[in-house]
Amino acid sequence: MGDTNLSAVLYAEDDMRLEEFPVKDPGPGEVQISMHSTGICGSDVHYWKHGRIGDFVLTTPMVLGHESSGTVCKVGSGVTSLKVGDRVAIEPGVPCRVCNYCKTGRYNLCREMQFCATPPYHGTLTRLYTHPADFCFKLPDNVSYEEGALLEPLSVGVHACRRAGVSLGSKVFICGAGPIGLVNMLTAKAMGASKVCISDISEGRLGVAKTMGADSIVLVNTKDAKAVAKQVETALGEMPDITIECSGAESSIQTGIYATKAGGVLMLVGLGPAEIKLPVVNAACREVDIRGLFRYANCYPAALEMIASGAVDVKPLITHHFTLEESLEAFETSRTGAGGAIKVMIKCAKQ
Ligand code: NAD
Ligand code: ZN
């Protein structure tokens, strides 16, 4: 301890400060990382503007950011998997490793999860960050730092497509063409989906989805869920086997139920209002399975392989670049979507 480094620290709602923050030396099994890139996620923006998400409430100052990559600069005792100079992506959630969820591989459900920039745990918008080595993934030379940072949202896509059972020939409908909808679209295609239709209320975002490989798009301009479901069926030529809801909007989740083929799956990825009205009898009588999703577990390796092999190209998601010193402007751009912002990247390294 003693050393400090520039960090984006949230003190309270609407009170993010760029200031010197203590550096943590790597303990046993940990590495210190000279941070390179951190992408801004909707949850970072939400903590910034509201100081809380559900039951997670900011009570002490917290460094923001959790989609990140950098270079190992110090290695703690016992670390054999990484060495100084290795470029890594950081999986931001570290579970207890010993509970039943952890032992059975569903560590995203661990009650002791320590997740970057979820209070009270610090995030990665800093120059020097320390993390357990086994939650760092070495990047091959052909994967950039920014792509490494995007392994985080891409892992949400991998987890959602796995849980939904996307496979060869699946017809998939994705609601919402934000970063999460787009990574789900890329993953579904890489996993063999034959047709992917994506919806949004924004024409601009649908345009991006189209250039990134959507087979069809649906511009939503009504809250009439049955009407939108009909549009989806027309766009795909049939009803989708799987719907992956990535907007959280009430009418969109309703659409997800009506749109999905009988016997299919509706995956709830988007998180909107805590309580909403849904046509559950329709889902029940047509055996549409509604499945929840919380982040990801064991998905970083597959996400990394997809990028390294060229099976997916996440680079078009990145629309804006800022330095750590410009964090406030970066957050504002992400919040407003100004200039067609989709994924805003912050370069944490000193310029
Ligand atoms: P985003 O806000 O950038 O994207 C949401 C998109 O949905 C926007 O483009 C918006 O225009 C569109 N939309 C709004 N209403 C719509 C409607 N009625 N029909 C179709 N599209 C509509 O957010 P994001 O970063 O892409 O994240 C998407 C959602 O996923 C958020 O709710 C986020 O909280 C959630 N999320 C959940 C998990 C999880 O573990 N379950 C992880 C990451 C993100
Ligand atoms: Zn656990």
Image (cartoon, grey):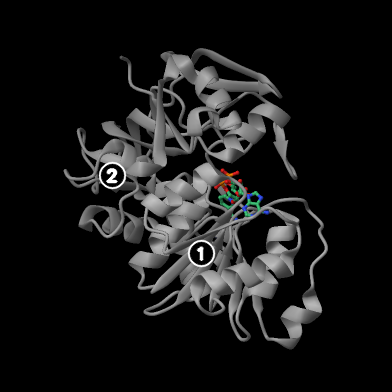
Judge from the rendering whether residue 281 lies leftward or rightward of residue 199; answer left or right.
right
Q: Residue at x 23, y 56 (%)?
A: 310
Rendered view: 302 above or below 41? below
Horizontally, residue 65 falls left or right of residue 308, namely right
Identify the amino acid type marked 1: Ala
Viewport quadrant of the C terminus = top left
Q: Is residue 52 left or right of residue 206?
A: right
* Residue 268 visible to the viewer: yes
Residue 307 drawn at (x, y percent): 28, 53
Disc 1 C-beta below 8 A from ligand 1: yes
Residue 8 vs 53, above or below: the answer is: above
Question: Which residue corresponds to mark 1?
Answer: 160
Q: Residue at x 27, y 33 (%)?
A: 71
Foreground label between 1 and 2: 1
**Mark identifier at residue 79:** 2
Residue 299 image-quadrant placement? bottom left
Q: Give neighbour class at mark 2: few <14, some 14-19, many 20+ (Cα, 10 Å).
A: some
The picture quadrant where one finds residue 167 is bottom left
> 234 or 289, which lies in front?
234
In the rendering, which numbered label is found on residue 319? none
Q: Position of residue 29 (x, y in %)?
A: 35, 43
Is residue 282 or residue 303 the one in the foreground? 282
N-terminal-most mark, 1 or 2: 2
**Residue 189 rendering spot, x and y as whole percentages:** 37, 66
Marks 1 and 2, how far apart at CA: 32 Å
SS class, disc 2: loop
Which residue does the image show at 50% across and 77% down from the upper left?
237
**Amino acid type for the residue under numbered disc 2:** Val
Residue 233 horizontal/vertical position (percent)? 57, 74
Total labels drawn: 2
